[in-house]
Amino acid sequence: MWRYLKSAFFVGVDVPGLGRVPVNALGAAAFGILGFAEPAFWFLGLAIEAAVVPALAFNPRFQKIVEARSLEASEGNADEKRKALVKLLETSAQQRLWALAKKCDQVLDVYRSQQAEDYIIDSNDQALKNLEWVYLKLLVARHHLLSPTSETEQSLEKKIQALDTDLRGGEESESLHQSKVATLNILKKRQATMRKKQQTLEEIESDLTRIDNQVDLILENATVQGKPQTISADIELASDLLGGSVFGEDESAIHELEQTYRQQKPSAQKQKETV
């Protein structure tokens, strides 16, 4: 509710030559300045704001506008982070991702040519985007696994042993102890990933091939079948993408994008239900 109240207070209108002007905030500031000359203006301004801001904040239409703008901002930020992930990939991996995206676009074009219902197209678009996102995560994980590193299994083992000894004999604060424990867990995950690196790479390649074939099948079905159908994006991966160690320094970006996409999915589902 706080974001609605804040948006209501700073609501603005577009003025030619000036851009968006926060008329309500400026009005409140004007009453504040006039109040130094005549204190009654303070009470008048407070009464107006107490009536206008909550009335606007609790208005369902205004809330939808605020939610739409918030979603647009998050989508814009997510798009920039996603592009950054794509840029770090080698050229062959980028071309592979673009080829998948092109086939996904072809699927939607087929459904549009069949004059499918809007909710079917929107649902299938979301499903295909989810497959593209999983595909990108697999490529990012493979990129980090193939990237040369100065760390070896032996050097990681030494760090683990040193930190483990430090935890057993150290006398530090609870927060410092928890930080060291978290670091130790990350080092162990990295060590485990390094030990099964080749296996993980083979699993990732298998998952990439599986998604390629799944999208090919979706495209073939969309072309052959006369009646548009809803696409399922559920896929069980052979590789484990839950461990942050496979994403390296891009773990935080992956996590933030995951949170953004989870917020967008309910909005898409809600839009589908209202059709």
Image: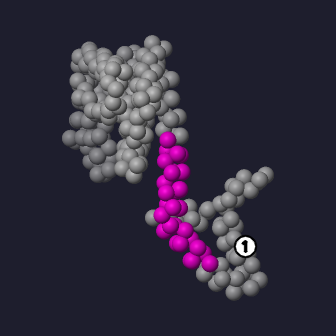
Q: Is residue 74 magenta?
A: yes
The residue sitting at the left extreme is: 168
Q: Residue at x 39, y 52 (%)?
A: 274
- Residue 126, visible in the rendered structure: no
Going by the image, does 80 lie left or right of 205?
right
The residue lying toward the viewer, choosing from 179 and 209, is: 209
Q: Where 159 falls versus 172 (above or below)?
A: above
Q: Residue at x 45, y 13 (%)?
A: 92
Magenta stretch, main secondary structure, is helix
**Residue 254 at what x, y percent from top left?**
40, 35
Identify residue type, mark 1.
Ala
Callout 1: 10 Å neighbours few (<14), some, many (20+)? some
Q: Where 9 falls versus 269 (above or below)?
A: below
Image quarter (top left, top right, bottom left or bottom right) of the N terminus? bottom left
For residue 197, which quarter of the picture? top left
Q: Residue at x 27, y 48 (%)?
A: 171
Q: Magenta span covers which residues?
A: 48-75
The residue lying toward the viewer, choosing from 115 and 126, is: 115
Q: Residue at x 31, y 37 (%)?
A: 183
Going by the image, does 26 lie left or right of 211?
right
The residue sitting at the top extreme is: 92
Q: Where 26 falls versus 206 (above or below)?
A: below
**Residue 9 at what x, y percent from top left?**
59, 66
Numbered circles on residues, count: 1
Q: Is residue 69 magenta?
A: yes
- Residue 202, visible in the rendered structure: yes
Residue identifier under label 1: 30
For residue 169, which quarter of the picture? top left
For residue 250, which quarter of the picture? top left
**Residue 187 at what x, y percent from top left?**
29, 30
Q: Secondary structure at mark 1?
A: helix
